Amino acid sequence: MHKQILVVILLFLGTGPGYIVMGYLYSSIIVEILWFVLFLLLSVWGWKLYRNYSRKMTISQKDRWLEKVKYFMFIYFSLWTIMFLYYISKDAISAHYIAIATQLGSAVVAATILASQKKLVVATVSFLMLPLVVYFIAIGELYSYILAFFTVVLSMVLLYAAKNTHAYLLKSRFQAYHDYLTGLGNRRYFIEYLDSSVRENKNRYTYLLLIDLDYFKTINDTLGHDVGDKLLVEVSQRLTQLADRCSNIVARLGGDEFCILSDALETKERCLAQAKEFSNKILHTIKETYFIEDSTLHISASIGVSIINNPKLNAHDFLKEADIAMYEVKSAGRDDVVIFNDALCKIIENKLHVERLLHFAIEKNEIYLQYQPQINCKNKIIGCEVLARWKSATLGQVSPEVFIGVAESTGYIIELGEYILEEAVKTLQRWESTGMHLHQMSINISVRQLLNKDFIPVVERLIRQYNVASFHTKLIFEITETSTSQDLKRLIVTINALKKYNIHFSIDDFGTGYSSLSYIRDIPVTELKIDQSFIAELDNKQQASLVKSIVDISKNLHLTTVAEGVETQEQRDFLEKIECDLYQGYLFSKPLLSEDFEKLMQSN
């Protein structure tokens, strides 16, 4: 309707002067001039309405604006009826013809321009065509009755065409603003509604929930997209039922993400309380059993909450806040609710800062390697583990727990891992050339890196480039047990492909993940590394018994066992007693730069 205002004004101001010409030929011209002045005044009103429209208006403001536009359009079109009545009162039959033609033209324009407003188009077309019907009937001749009939038919055709156009516009708008699968509002709908709510409720509070279904991809991959789609429909129905009780708005942003926006509340405390209560209801409702195509399904959700009371921010800002809170739930184990706050925002900002700087760390030579010795029961250094370190010019020394996690989540681990691998192989080549032979060198490899399509070609290039096949030292790639469930089949295929290059594999942090026995049964590894958290509590009988069980299992499977985090002689004595093969920890040495490691090897 906003664009139609300008179209109507330009159209009518372009044709209106025709009546002044007709007035000059057939009338006194005074009435026509007064009529056209009125047209100009109404056009000024219409122009102001056109200029006053803004996309930043709230939904209620747009509704009020539209009501004014409807009144303007009806009055504007009605001016033609005034001239029709004036001209049919003239004796000159030519004036009648002009009045009939302009009235019909106005009706056609109204049916076309106002089709998006159903009630307005019916009222306007009827108001324009009814005087024509009455005029023809008043003539009292057979031909005039026929013309009256055809006028009624034309009116019905115009209204029918307007009705079809209106239906098409409604359908197009629905498709543009709604999700095809669930019928809920889509991202576009929700963003516009949220922006409107933010501006309309400046001094009140609303809460925004971003809901992500946990492990939905697993259901899609195992049971098929048809089952996944039906599950999404069922979830949307449950959310809608809950939301309707509280007058909340539900939308599907895409995939398995849903959003809910609350009604406005007076205080922040009440808003927080209702957000928590409503979120917990959602968690409980979503976890109820689903029965879809003979399958019994269970699913949970992670919910991020943003409290809205800042008109300076827009919808995307609040969605981002809820998204940050939701991913905090994901990283903490899922199936929970987290409310966005300043502390969480600071954590994310720091993480983003680390992420930005990390991308230039290799280029600035800030990433370096250290080597921690691995000792056998005779206190001889037989190998080492390669450990990546980052000394940032901006942040100083950054913990591997921080930057490796950031690299994993951003995908930068591919580039970083390749750099670490090549630097380690370079060091090993130098050691080999100086006659310093180790039994093994362990390098941590991210499963994301291992499953990357370019990883095997990278390893092949390094083997050729540095003549790794001639080394006395065997390379061991350490993979974290907790991550091996990502794609077990692909993982096994990749490991088997690399074994032909005499590369061995170890499960790092063994015992901290799930289904450990099935992993060491299925994955062709040669070594287990007992996580340091177990070694730190060897004074606990239950923990000591668990470590012994791991060593026994390893021996039964003919695997080498490495104990990490050995810091006391008592721990070392116990591990030797249960026949653990290798030890690694501060009791023997902290991680060393390559030069210091070489000196330690010489003294050893």
Image: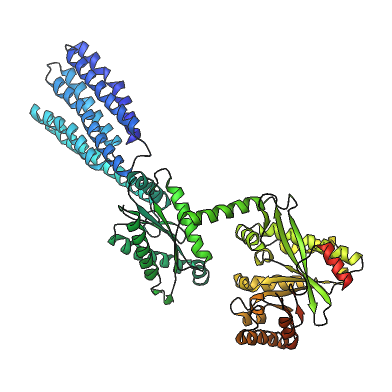
Up-down: is 399 above or below 188?
A: below
Give the left or right position of residue 24, taking residue 11 as reference.
left
Return the x and y of residue 64 as percentages of the image width and height: 26, 39
Extreme residue in the front direction: 569
Q: Is 511 placed left or right of 72 in the picture?
A: right
Identify the colour scheme used. Answer: rainbow
Q: Is residue 558 visible?
A: no
From the top left corner, tell me how far across and down residue 173 is, in percent: 36, 47
Q: How many marks?
A: 0
User: What residue is shown at x 27% (from left), y 17% (from top)?
Assistant: 17
Q: Quadrant of residue 597?
A: bottom right
Residue closest to the eye, 359 or 346: 346
Q: Nearer the viewer, residue 64 or 385?
A: 385
Q: Position of residue 42 (x, y in %)?
A: 25, 25
* Residue situated in front as seen by the camera: 494 or 531: 531
The residue at the point 42 percent across, 77 percent down is 296
Nearer-the-camera pick, 295 or 547? 547
Quadrant containing the C terminus in the rendered view: bottom right
Residue 57 position, x and y percent, is 34, 39
**Which quadrant of the structure image shows residue 146?**
top left
Is residue 30 something one can see in this rendering? yes
Q: Residue at x 32, y 49 (%)?
A: 204
Q: Where, quadrant-wise, is the N terminus in this rendering?
A: top left
